[in-house]
Image: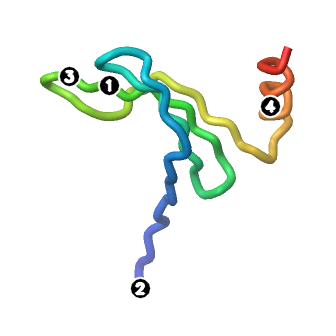
Amino acid sequence: MNKTNQTEQEEIGRIKLSDAQDLVASLIDKEKLDLRIFIKTDSYTGATKRGIRFYLFDNNWIEFKKLINK
């Protein structure tokens, strides 16, 4: 029996950047925060490679929170 790992992704917020772009925050497997640009064009609608992913139980996330709270 072959099981595949399925990633659980939950959108937790969206900020409209322009008519064609949104910044979407998603929680992945309840342990990672993904901030990604989504675009809507005639030829493509969906996520881009532009974004960042934080592991919530990692010091990088703590440092990022300190940075944005300045």
The residue carrying pointer 2 sits among few (fewer than 14), some (14 to 19) or many (20 or more) residues within 10 Å by Cα, namely few
Mark 2 vs mark 4: in front: 4
Residue at image mark 1: 39
| Residue 12 image offset from top left, x and y in percent | 55, 45
Between 50 and 35, the residue placed more toward the observer is 35
| Residue 25 image offset from top left, x and y in percent | 55, 37
Residue at image mark 4: 60
The residue carrying pointer 4 sits among few (fewer than 14), some (14 to 19) or many (20 or more) residues within 10 Å by Cα, namely few
Query: Which mark, residue 1?
Result: 2
| Residue 59 image offset from top left, x and y in percent | 85, 36
Q: Secondary structure at mark 3?
A: loop
Q: Considering only vertical position in the picture, is 15 above or below 31?
A: above
Q: Secondary structure at mark 1?
A: strand
Q: Considering only vertical position in the picture, is 56 above or below 41?
A: below
Per the model, the C-alpha gap separating discs 2 and 1 is 38 Å
Please report whichever mark, 2 or 1, sits nearer to the chain's N-terminal start. Answer: 2
Per the model, the C-alpha gap separating discs 2 and 4 is 38 Å
Please report whichever mark, 2 or 4, sits nearer to the chain's N-terminal start. Answer: 2
Q: The N terminus is located in which quarter? A: bottom left
Per the model, the C-alpha gap separating discs 2 and 3 is 41 Å
Mark 2 vs mark 1: in front: 1
Residue at image mark 3: 41
Q: The C terminus is located in which quarter? A: top right
Image point 50% across, 53% down: which residue? 9
Per the model, the C-alpha gap separating discs 4 and 1 is 27 Å
Contact, mark 4 vs mark 1 (Cβ under 8 Å): no
Q: Amino acid at mark 2?
A: Met
Contact, mark 2 vs mark 4 (Cβ under 8 Å): no
